[in-house]
């Protein structure tokens, strides 16, 4: 973009780079927010005369002329990218760049701009406003994909395509909220699906998507529908356009002694990954208090990530404590076990249980979990 030098009535710019765009945006903001400023009066008298900043049509400056030539392209491009620009308020986050926001503290937004739409910013000839529109559109289409999976709450996802693979297996494609949304699920992790069986009773089961986070805008499940499967009934009845309730995964860990080492590595990898949203509950069993390994680190995880990691220490030979405290611990342990890990309650049937410890403990815990209703796929 070329214009005349300052001493010949131009803005003195030969080429508008990214840095110039920012500078021009600030100049435009200064003009509109401080019209009584000496600089604003000089510029307005020089370029605008008696016309509005948003409606001026012509000036001898090469800068204004070059912007005029791009008006149609800018307007059409903005409509294609954003939608009806006459209804989009300027004072929204995608239209205000961080560099521009820094000026707001010094120059409060005038009342007359609060209801302003982006339309004059895209069709006007002001360099600052045109630059702002282009920058905002670019930022809008280059922002990070939206993460939509919630490990605590079920969300509804619409079935957009059902493909039958054989007599009892089908592939289900579900749309995410936006074309740029991702499921945000690590490789090998499952989601929790909620549906209803033949009697209309709620049923919850874990499934592993076959899609990755590189597949934006949708996720897919391959489901084998068993004749007597309660969740299978729900998937069998699903048609395109129906909705499925889905939420993120949770892990339960049963650990004994030195079995904490692989679980510690897995826990750290999950909760320290900002892109992972898995919730972990760890029961760590030892003989005495002195036998607990990595306690300081585990307590650190629980302190740093209280909403995603909880650890419970269980001792077969606890230290001497008053009788009432022992009773309290027994009650807490009993309540925790029944409320947190019984699949029949339909509260945490979505939980995947990982076991790691001495052979005797592993076998005993596997038998207990099976007796409680956990299938072999739900604990490993």
Image (spheres, rainbow, N blue to C red):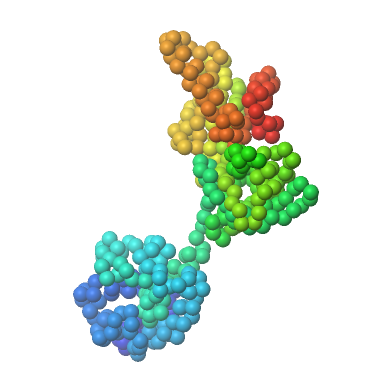
**Percent x, y of residue 308:** 50, 37
**Percent x, y of residue 206:** 63, 40
Q: Nearer the viewer, residue 258 or 200?
A: 200
Q: Quadrant of residue 322?
A: top left
Asked whether residue 137 appears in the rendered view, the answer is yes
Asked whether residue 208 appears in the rendered view, the answer is no
Q: Nearer the viewer, residue 325 or 136?
A: 325
Establish if 55 lies above or below 333: below
**Percent x, y of residue 3:** 39, 85
- Which residue lies most toward the right here? 167
Image quadrant containing the N terminus: bottom left
- Which residue lies most toward the front here? 199
Picture residue at 48% right of the left edge, 69% below the top: 82
Picture residue at 50% right of the left edge, 71% below the top: 81
Picture residue at 68% right of the left edge, 31% below the top: 375
Establish if 201 lies above or below 13: above
Picture residue at 54% right of the left edge, 12% below the top: 317
**Percent x, y of residue 125:** 38, 81
Establish if 183 lies above or below 355: below
Image quadrant containing the C terminus: top right
Establish if 286 lies above or below 61: above
Q: Is residue 35 left or right of residue 374?
A: left
Q: Nearer the viewer, residue 136 or 7?
A: 136
């Amino acid at each position: 973009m070329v214009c005349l030098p300052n001493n010949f009535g131009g803005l003195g710019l030969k080429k508008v780079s990214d840095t110039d765009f920012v500078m021009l945006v600030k100049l435009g903001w200064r003009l509109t927010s401080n019209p009584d400023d000496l600089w604003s009066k000089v510029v307005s008298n020089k370029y605008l005369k008696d016309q509005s900043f948003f409606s001026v049509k012509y000036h001898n400056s090469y800068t204004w002329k070059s912007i005029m030539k791009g008006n149609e392209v800018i307007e059409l491009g903005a409509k294609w990218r954003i939608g009806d620009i006459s209804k989009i308020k300027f004072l929204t986050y995608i239209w205000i760049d961080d560099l521009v926001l820094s000026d707001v503290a010094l120059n409060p937004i005038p009342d007359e701009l609060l209801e302003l739409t982006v339309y004059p910013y895209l069709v006007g000839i002001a360099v600052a406003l045109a630059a702002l529109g282009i920058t905002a559109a670019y930022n809008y289409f280059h922002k990070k994909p939206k993460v939509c999976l919630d490990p605590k709450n079920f969300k509804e996802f619409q079935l957009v395509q059902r493909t039958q693979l054989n007599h009892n297996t089908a592939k289900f494609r579900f749309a995410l909220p936006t074309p740029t949304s991702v499921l945000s699920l690590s490789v090998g992790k499952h989601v929790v699906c909620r549906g209803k069986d033949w009697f209309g009773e709620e049923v919850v089961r874990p499934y592993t998507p076959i899609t990755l986070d590189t597949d934006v805008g949708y996720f897919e499940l391959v489901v084998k529908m068993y004749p007597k499967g309660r969740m299978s009934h729900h998937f069998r009845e699903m048609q395109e356009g129906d909705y499925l309730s889905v939420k993120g995964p949770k892990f339960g860990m049963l650990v004994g002694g030195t079995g904490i080492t692989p679980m510690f590595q897995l826990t750290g990898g999950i909760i320290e990954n900002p892109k992972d949203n898995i919730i972990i509950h760890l029961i760590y069993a030892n003989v005495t208090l002195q036998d607990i390994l990595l306690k300081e680190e585990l307590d650190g995880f629980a302190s740093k990530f209280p909403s995603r990691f909880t650890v419970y220490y269980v001792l077969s030979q606890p230290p001497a404590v008053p009788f009432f405290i022992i009773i309290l611990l027994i009650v807490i342990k009993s309540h925790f076990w029944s409320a947190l890990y019984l699949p029949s309650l339909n509260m945490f049937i979505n939980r995947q249980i990982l076991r790691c410890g001495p052979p005797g403990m592993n076998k005993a815990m596997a038998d207990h979990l099976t007796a409680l209703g956990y299938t072999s796929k739900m604990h490993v």
